[in-house]
Image (spheres, grey):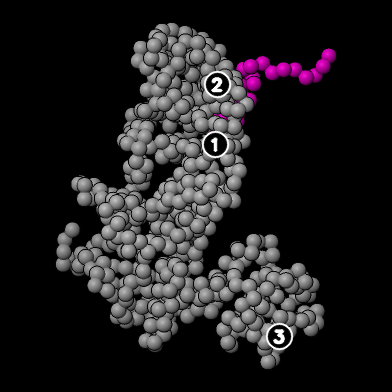
Amino acid sequence: MGKIRQLDETLANMIAAGEVVENMASVVKELVENALDAQAGNIDIRLKDSGLKEIRVTDDGEGMDEEDIEMAFRRHATSKIRTEHDLHHIASLGFRGEALPSIASVAVVGIDSASEDKAGTKLLVKNGEVIEKTAGRAKRGTTVFVRDLFYNTPARLKHLRSEKRELAAVVDTVNNLALAHPDVRFRLSNNEKTILETPGSGDVLKVLREIHPLDVIKNLLAFENENRYFHIKGYTSKPSHTRSSRSHMVIVTNRRTIKSPRVQNAILSAYRTYLFGNRFPITYLEITLDPLLVDVNIHPQKLSVKFTEEKALLELVESTIRETLQGADLIERVRREPGKTAEQSRLDFSRTPRTDERAEEETRPYGEKGKEAQTADATEEKQTFPDLAYVGQAFGTYLLFQDEENLYLMDQHAAAERVRYETIRQALSTKDAGIRPLLQPLAISLSNRETESLPDIADELAAQGIDHEETDATSIAVKAVPRWFPEGEEEAFAERTIRLLLEERSVSREDFLDHAAKELACKTSVRANKHLARHEIDHLVRDLSRCENPFTCPHGRPTIIAFSDTELETMFKRVVR
């Protein structure tokens, strides 16, 4: 007798559920996507105990008749694909026909649905089998409830995370779906407590306002661009408003929320040297393209996609966000109230209520002013460095300046590091920028292993303008260096460049150049606790103002922080807010 047997439908559905249903958030995603595909204008998601006890999704979409409701619980049954041609022109969110039968194999599922022209039908399904069928609602739309998720798969139930973390995953899922569909009104609640409610006005900024505090919204930068294949638009936060994870980087493709590490990395590349430490911007990126240029059928949960012209997309995203950052005022503003820390002040400030139209207009992010205001401000689109009047130096580290409205503190080391970084970065990126022969060769000591590896980086050393020859097993003689190497520091720069090339051979040239420029700039910039002469300060400010990004050091720390005159008066209680 043969060993191979065809699985029965119930067991096949339970296996499919392992791919489609990971937790409560994946159930919510599948049910809400069905509602969106049904052209719902209002979607209500109600949870009990974060969804573990019950998930109930109600919509006012097209609904289903009796025949369609029963068919919906069969594997690979879908209304969204008919031919192979449809598979390459997918415009719907759900199309695999696995969601409902997979969910019904690991939970108790009830559905109550009605279309325009027929009476409603109600089904109760358990273990993939219909156990009850009755007359249902008379109102157009659908309600689906999912109870006792994973009741028959205890191993998967055991491996769910804490209730708070599972609820957070559901909130993230609904937030992202609401952002992708701002024209739909969403309401999410858990144990009768409302967590999210969007207006359904079509304005994605209003959805963002329901997700993030006001202070974040005021510090978002609007962007929009296109090339031959893609149109992109969205919002991204100033470097002063970031998060510790990538979860607030939302990417939407043709109204489908996706996960794309490569697109996220393109966003982060635009923020290169703007972010400090392991921080990530708050970004909403909407990508519109021909469905032929994207394959959405590569992931069981339809989270990942494959772009045909991905390189063109990544270049468009990176260049657009970089230019947006370069055109914005990125000076970090300090808002401090008497008796409170800076962080407490920020938290309080971010929750200031919107009370009138003027307040709402003031919260619109950079680039989102009205058309008349945009026209009036056209000459101010490109941010220029403030016109600073020098006041003095504090603690041998911070330079004080002022203008008519602000007091500025500049970190002299961070500022000098930014200037050095951009100078070195440009020099490293320039091929054949000229070399300077040395009257006396520089002796660079290396280990025997490093000397043996020198042939592997010979071409790059030559491209950078370092001419050398091996003298023995543990040293080389450098006979010429790039012209941009500072006089008196040729040996330090040459040795560090050689060692960086030896250590970082596996990284891309772009990453190497950036790493090298950061390290060389940090090692050779003016340090803290050093008194600067007035002419040195003038040169530093002038050079900083000419930088591509004068507002942060190469590692993302701010170079300059501002206190407004109003904030200072508030601290000294000259005015009361």
Give the structural element (helix, strand or loop) at label 3: strand
Q: Eyeballing the image, is 185 above or below 342?
A: above
Q: Which mark is residue 78?
A: 2
What kind of residue is marked 1? Pro
Task: Give the CA separation, mark 2 to mark 1.
Answer: 19 Å
Q: In this view, which residue lies farthest toward the top?
A: 134
The residue range painted magenta reads 1-22
Query: Could you give the CA–CA distance between mark 2 and mark 3, rounded to whole angstroms?
Result: 72 Å
Question: In this view of the protein, can residue 148 be seen by the observer?
Answer: yes
- Residue at 39 percent of width and 19 percent of height: 141
Circle 2/circle 3 CB separation < 8 Å = no
- x and y, in percent, of residue 256 in the image: 49, 37
Direction from residue 2 to residue 65 in the image, left or right: left
Viewer-side label of 1, 3: 1
State yes or no: residue 15 in magenta: yes
The answer to whether residue 207 is magenta is no
Quadrant location of residue 7? Answer: top right
Residue 291 is marked as: 1
Report the disc number at residue 479: 3
Residue visible at 59% across and 19% down in the picture? 75
